[in-house]
Amino acid sequence: MKELEENTIEQIRTLLNYLEQTDLLKNKEIFRCLDIIARDYGGEIVDNN
């Protein structure tokens, strides 16, 4: 994910935060979104819950 510009990361963070606060997205769905983004850049998000 290092290839992502900080501005892009901040935009993703802001959007996911908004979706969570408006109950349009739940925590489990947020982890799935982040995992998809991370995999595109060679990483992986691990949810230990």
Image (cartoon, rainbow, N blue to C red):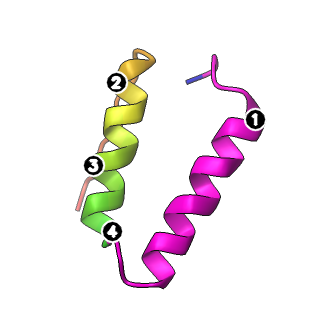
> Circle 3 sits on which residue?
32
Q: What residue type is labelled 3?
A: Arg
Name the amino acid, label 1: Glu
Disc with the residue nearer the chain's start (2 vs 4): 4
Q: Which of marks 2 and 1 is nearer the N terminus?
A: 1
In percent of the image, x 46 and y 71: which residue is there? 19
Q: Mark 2 and mark 1: span between their CA atoms?
A: 18 Å
Give the answer, above or below, for where 8 lies relative to 23. Answer: above
Q: Which amino acid does label 4 sit on?
A: Asn
How many numbered discs sit on the rendered protein?
A: 4
Task: For mark 3, give the secondary structure.
Answer: helix
Give, as a three-letter code, the residue at label 2.
Arg
- Residue 28 percent coordinates (x, y): 25, 63
> Which range is magenta?
2-25
User: Going from the N terminus, do you reach mark 2 or mark 3 first?
Assistant: 3
Name the side, left or right, on which 35 lies relative to 10.
Answer: left
Q: Quadrant of the N terminus?
A: top right
The residue to which callout 2 is attached is: 39
Q: What element carries label 4?
A: helix
Density class for disc 3 (Cα within 10 Å; few <14, some 14-19, many ≥20) is some
Q: Is mark 2 on a helix, strand or loop?
A: helix
Q: Which mark is residue 27?
A: 4
